[in-house]
Every structure is written in structure tokens, then in C-alpha cells.
Amino acid sequence: MTTPTDVLTPDGSDGKAAAADADGLAIRTLSPTIVYSALDTSPRGLTTAAADARLRQFGSNELPRAAHPAMWRQLAAQFTDLFAVVLLIASAITFLAYALQEPRDVGTLQLAVAILGVVALNASIGFAQEYSAERTAESLQAMVPHTCRVLRDAVLRELPARELVHGDVVLLEAGDAVSADCRLVEAHDITVNNAAITGESDAVGRSHEPERQGPVLEARNCVFMGTDVVAGTAKAVVFATGRSTEFGRIFQLTAAAPRQKTPLQHQVASMARRVAGTALAVGALLFAVRLPAGQGLVSAFVFALGVMVALVPEGLPATLSVSLAIGVRRMARRHALVKQLLAVEALGSTTVVCTDKTGTLTQAEMTVVQVWVGGVMHAVSGVGYEPAGEVADPEPVRAVLRTAALCSNARLVPPSEGGRWHVLGDTTEGALLVAAAKAGLDGVAEEGAAPRVGEHPFDSVRKLMSTVHSGADGYHACVKGAPQELLERCTAIDRQSEVIALTDALRAEVMDVNDELAKQGLRVLAAARRELSGPHPDRECVESGLTFLGLVGMLDPPRPEVREAVTACHRAGIRVVMVTGDHPLTAEAVARRVGIVQRADPTVMTGARLNELDDDALDELLAGQGELLLCRVSPEHKMRVVTAFQRRHEVVAVTGDGANDAPALKHADIGVAMGASGTDVAREAAVMVLLDDSFASIATAVRLGRSVYQNIRKFLVYLFSHNIGELVPILAATFAGFPLVPISAVQILAIDLGSDVLPALALGAEPPEDDVMDHPPRSRDERLFSPAVMGRILFLGGIQAAGVCAVFFWHINASGIPYADFTEDSVAYREAITLVQAGIVVSQFFNALAVRTERESVFRAGLLSNLWLLAAGFFGIGLMAAISYLPPLQEVFNTAPLTVTDWAVLGGLGVVLLAAEEARKAWLRHRAARDNGGER
Ligand code: ATP
């Protein structure tokens, strides 16, 4: 047998791996008692000093981060994007054209350089965006610390997983992610999912019995880092941490998984491609028109190419990603961590939220307030987990509270410096420990008198938990659970004075009392016990033939912020369905308090009745839009309901905390896990994690999700409408027989990349509109470029185009020079193209203000409520002024100084655009009011 010293001698990191290997092989052969000594620890856990020493010596329990691709690779990847390649080719051709030109036109060279500039700028925006998205993802991950329950100095503590060292004694339960390689020393019905290591996702049972030597991964008495506990509980000793674990060894330094594009990103990318195609067609058309008009081949080609490049919406995909990333950051600030961009989008179209009760709608601060025993109700005073309060007549309630407390795994933690008492473990069990203390029971003494020798952990299908204890009079079982389930397994009842057979009449009496307590919104648990002949009977034996002891009613006050959030969801046309394992009456009482139920006759469906419904009947049940409570359900029911809602094309958000909620969380459109109380498994399966567990954070995330979508529509309208303003004058000039362009490609690029990018980004960061939760969710099938959006683009773009065309031709015609005599150097021409460029810049300033709201007047939203946008707009105008007045820039852009009157005229054009859009919005509001808010 391996001795402690030869497995644990540290000799550098490689040596550590070897030592751990020896551990793994040897550790499985040891009996649990020897495991402790082999790893130089004890059933009381390590002392803090020993643990600290090991942490210093062997390092923390962490794996090296997945390596990011080298920066230069990330940057280089930006140049392989389709747009970039097209633009690079365009630039190369332009350079070639310049080289072939006779005489050489410096304008062609400028264009070639400008196109290169476009590619470079675009690549840097894309790179910066990706880089910051990665950092955001990392920092979000860090916000949900991975902890584990460890015995140190004989006290159960919750510690960051990275502080684990070999020899630590950890407690595992369903839903935990295993944080290090451990040897089990106690196992209670534990099953684990080893998919992360073996690739097989079936749950496998584990035990603490020693085994013969063999491959460590096949050891049934070991659990490994990276795997999950599916059911049961266990006590285990850590034998390998960090890189020395099996997971650490197979963990490749893989590049971060490629981020998937969301449907929205796909839509925008495909739209951008279509626009690029259109630009190509327009370019070809202009080339075909200009060639016979006597322009040289090269000059006609360069012209067409310039127009084409200018029309391509280069910055669009990057702006979209930035806007989604801003949404993610905003949600994180409001306690909702989104793990995939996809969720930001889906949140905006959520139609149904299926929510848990405990912790999400309530505070999960359980306090036992009633104990019913021997036909008498006893009130318990005090609030929260501080064991201060009392039971007026403690003697009769002791038996039921003793049984319930012995059958608990939670631990009460006294306040540390100004804090409050809190619970480590299940809050329901914590409340039972507090009540037992209030009844004068001493937990340590009780455990000493009846040490636990076996356990059948709680699960939400059985709704029971049982423990086996040895005492002076032999063995006995303590069982607690949902009253109905427990009562079915009882044959006798303790009436204090005597133990009598449990008749139907007595069962009915117990259930009446249960209903009475549940109607008050209390969570009710029952406790029972039985004598046993030996320490290891099977579960069926432990949980049958029981003697019923009494009922315990505990209060869990609703969260104060939930009512308003539920109202907001209702107003926003989102259905809120409560899905709980609790009793229907408890559920209904809580649902009324938080506003989920308002009518006298909500539909209350239990898990048992759900089982009787076939899929058609279930669909029919869900089709009714009435208030719906699903009670006494198990995670399988949750999954079935989610699937049924999805069959009805609903977009479903579902909350979950337990290990077996994972399938429903994965299947839902938005799986929402609890960050504070949820299990690791649930957090892994979900796409969104609530840091504060509150329902209100879901409502906030939906609001922000909707606003992200709205913002995207805003900048799309903003960006695409100005393309019309650029294109129409070019077409008009071409078809009017004017020999030159009314705006050059370099000028267009200056607008697209100079004055338009920042306002578009600022629009992507708009705060949510006030009425964002006042209309029904958008349809899942609604296209981003809906007829309404296209209409708005044409409306605003049309006004812009008409305005700049008017300014251009007015100026050209006023000069009195015949069209054919115009050259690039004509002063009137230079002034006219400056007017066109400035006209677009100024009207884009007003356009940005106009698109800020969809229906509300922008003056009501407040012109100053997005200062970034104003700053970005003024920056654009400043840039335009520089292009108009600074000689070096005049050279590059072939521009001329504008007069005050020019600016005034252009300002007037912008005001007309804003006023027209305000009038259109007023008409929309009027129509909506007429249709009673029925239309968007
Ligand atoms: P909620 O929606 O309130 O979060 P849930 O779905 O988590 O409820 P479960 O935890 O499955 O509900 O509990 C169902 C029932 O099982 C409870 O009403 C209670 O009677 C009983 N129960 C809950 N926790 C325990 C426990 N630790 N031991 C024994 N019985 C329990």
C-alpha cells in the first residue's frame, strides 16, 4: 500500500502530477478510515493552518485559463472577413488604375488610400469589439464565484473552490460541480455525471467502498473535477487539485470556443450583403452609363468603384456587436448575467415566464411560525435565522422539531461583524434548526445522543428526506417531507398522550390542518419517525410504516420588488406562470401577494393532474390565457410544460435552481438560473444567471432586451437612410446629364467613417424608452427589416435625398454655367459638393435625434437624455466644418468654404426632417389611440 509520504511528496509541478497519479491508483484501494490518514487529514477536516500551508506549497486549485489566440492572429482574422477582402481587392484595383492612368489623377490615389483606410478602421473596430467582448465574458464569469462546502477545523464552511487543497474534507450534494478529484468516504445514493471527462452523459452511481487497483477513472469510489453530482449526497476527501487532477491533465489549452452569431447578427450580415450586392449593381449601372458619355474607361471605372465602396455599410456588423455587448453589460449591472448574446435578443421577445416560487418570488428567508402536534397548534415567535424567539409551550413540539432537525444537513452560521445569522445549505432545513433551538433543543447534544448512520437525501420527485440514527434504544429513522407524500407512508400517529393507528378520519384532519396553513401562504413540512432493527435498511423500509409526529408551517415573505415587476410583465403582454413543488394553496396565497393571481378562479394544476393530460389536453390548457399555477410539480413536469409552450410558438423563459432543472433550462429559449442559491449544474445549463435570484431582475432583463432590439432598429434606420441621401443625388446627376458627381467617394467615406460611426454607436447605447414595456412582445418571426423599418428608412432617406438634390442643383444652376463646362476645379462645383456633404452631415444630426424614439415625441424623451449622441453629432459637424474650411482638407476633399447662409439653409433642411418625423410619429400615436393600442 502506498504510504502518505510517498504519494504526497511535492517535487515541482510535474512531480505533483505524478504524485497525484500514484494517489489516484492507490487511493481507491483504501478503506475510508485509512483514506484520512493516507492524506494526512481527519474526519474533522484540515486545520486552517495546515490547509494554508498546503495552499502555499502546492498552489491554488485552478486550471490555467484557455489561451486566447495571439493578438496579431485576432487582428489578422479581421482582414479575412468578406467585406474586408472585397474592399482590399477594390483598393488594389484602384491602385492599379492610378498606375495605368495617363495623366495620373491624384484623386484616384486618394480613393485607393481611403479604401485601405476603411479596411483598417473597420478591422480595428472589429478587433477592439471582440477583445472587449472576451474580457466582458471573463469578468462576468468571475462574478459568479465557484464555491464548495468544506470542513475546516471541524466546522462546515463555504470556501472558494480555488482554495481547496488535498486532504480537505468536502460535502457534496445534488447539483454541485465537483471542484477537485476526491475519494468518497461516505456516500448516500450519490450519482454523478462524468460527461466532462469520459464523454458519457449517463449518470453513474458511486459508493465509498474500497476497490481493487485499476484505472483511476473507473474507480467507483472517486469523483473528479469537472463532473457534476446528479443526485444524493456524499462526504469526500480531496486527493488532487488543479493541474494534478484528471481533468487538469486532459484539459487542453484550447482556444476559446468560437462565439456563435445570433439570428439578429445573421439578419444584419445578410442585409449588409444584399446592400453590398445592390451597391455592386449600382456601380455597374453607373459604369455602363458613364462610359458612353465619353469618360475614359479608367475614370468611369474608378467612379463606379468609389460609389460602390461608399454604399457598402462597412461599420454595421461592428456597431451591432457593440450594441449587443452594451446590453449585456447593462443587464449585468442590474444583476442579470447573460452568458450568450443570443439571450439578449430572445429576452426581448419573451412571451411567457415560468417562475419558481422560493427565492425568486419570495425572499427564501424561511421562519417556522406554526407547529401542529397532537391536534394543537403552537405559535413560534421571532423572524429570520437568528435563534431568538420562543414557543409558548415548548415541550409538546420538541419531538417533531428534534426529528426534523436531525433529518437536516444545513448549518446555522452566527453573524460575523454586524452581519446577520444565515444558513449554509437548504434554507427550509435552516428554518427547522432555528425552530428546534427556539424550542430549547441543543443541536450538538441531540446529534451526540443519536448519531447519524445513514441518509436518503431529499429529491423533488419523492419530496421526502430520511436519515437513520443509532441511539440508546437501537436504531431509528427520522423522515421529513411534503405532508401528502409523508402521510401516505405513515401507519400511526403520535397524539402526544398515545400512539394510535392512522385512520382515514385522522388523515383527513391532518390534511385539513395542512390546507389551513398553506392558505396562509406557509410552506408546510411534516415529520415522522420509526424504529429500525439495523443501521442499513433500504430506503423503502426506512420510509414506510412511519409514525406521524406533526406539521411545521414556515413563512417565506414575498420579495417587495416582485409585485411591480409582475405588473410590468403583465402590461408588456408577458404571461407569468408559477411552477412550484409546493402545495397549491401555499402557491396561490403567494401568487396573490405578488400579483400573479388576481382573479378569483385561477387555474391550479398539480403535477399529478398534469400526468393525466395528454399533449393535446396540455396544449389546450396552456392556450387559455388565464392565470395559471403549476404546483407540486417535479422538474420533469417543468420540462414538459416548457416544450408544450414552445409548441405554441411561445418564447419561454424558465427559472431553475436544482440539478434536475438542467434539461428544462437548456430546452427553454431563456434558461434562467439562480446565482445565489442555485446549483452549479443549473448555472451551467442556463443562458442567464440572476445574481440576486429575484424575479424582478428577469423583468428588468426583458426590458433591457427589448430596448437593445429597439436601439438596433434605430441605428439601422439612421445608417441606411443616409445611404439613400448619398445615392439619389448621384443617380439624379447622372441621369440629368451632369458630367461630374454631386458627392465624391472620398466625401462619402468621410461621412460613413467620420461623422456617422459615433452617433450610430451612441444610438446603440440609448437608454430604454419609457414605453418599452407598454406593448406586447414582438413576434419571434418579425424580421429586423420589417415593412415599418423599411418604410421609415425610405421616409427619412427620401427627405434627405430631396433636400440635398435641391441644394446641389440650385447651386449649380444659380452659377449659370452650362453643365458640360463644369470641371472638378470649378468653384461653383466645389461649393456645390461641399453643400451636399454638409447637407447630409447636418441632416444626419437631426436624423439621429428623430430616430431616437419610435412613437413618442423626441422632445418628450428629452433632447439631452443621450449626451453621447449630441456630442457625437457635434463632432460630425465639427469634422465637416474642418473639411470645408481647412486648406489641406479642402485639397483632399475638393471642398470650398461654406457661408453662414449655407449653414442656415442646411440647418433648415434638418429641421424639416425632424418636423416631418415628429408629424409621422404623432400620426402613429393618433392611429394607435384610435385603434385602442392594438397596433404597434
Ligand atoms: P419552490 O417553487 O417554492 O422553489 P420547489 O419547486 O423548490 O418549490 P421543492 O423544493 O421540490 O419545491 O419542495 C417540494 C416540497 O417538498 C415542499 O413543499 C416541502 O414540503 C418539501 N420539502 C422541501 N424541502 C425539503 C427538504 N429539505 N426536506 C424534506 N422535504 C422538503
Image (tube, grey):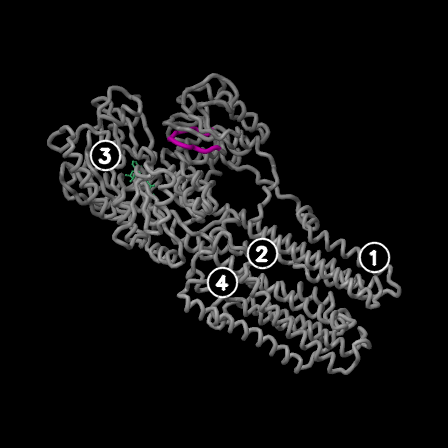
The total of numbered circles placed on residues is 4
Q: Residues within 10 Å of mark 4 (few under 14, many from 20)?
A: some
Residue 506, percent from left and from top: 15, 34
Residue 466, percent from left and from top: 29, 30
What is the three-letter code of the residue carrying label 3? Ala
Q: Is mark 3 within 8 Å of ligand 1?
A: no
Q: Are marks 2 and 1 in contact (CB under 8 Å)?
A: no
Q: CA distance from mark 3 to mark 2?
A: 57 Å
Residue shown at the point (39%, 54%) measured from the top left: 696
Q: Residue furthest left?
A: 497
Q: Residue furthest right?
A: 102
Where does label 1 land, which residue? Answer: 96
Where does label 3 land, which residue? Answer: 527
Q: Earlier in the sequence, mark 1 or mark 4?
A: 1
Where does label 2 land, which residue? Answer: 320
Where does label 4 land, which residue? Answer: 767
Per the rendered image, the range of residues in magenta is 227-238
Of discs 4 and 2, which sits in the foreground?
2
Q: CA distance from mark 4 to mark 2?
A: 16 Å
Please name whichever residue, 356 or 932, is drawn nearer the observer in this view of the structure.
932
Q: CA distance from mark 4 to mark 3?
A: 52 Å
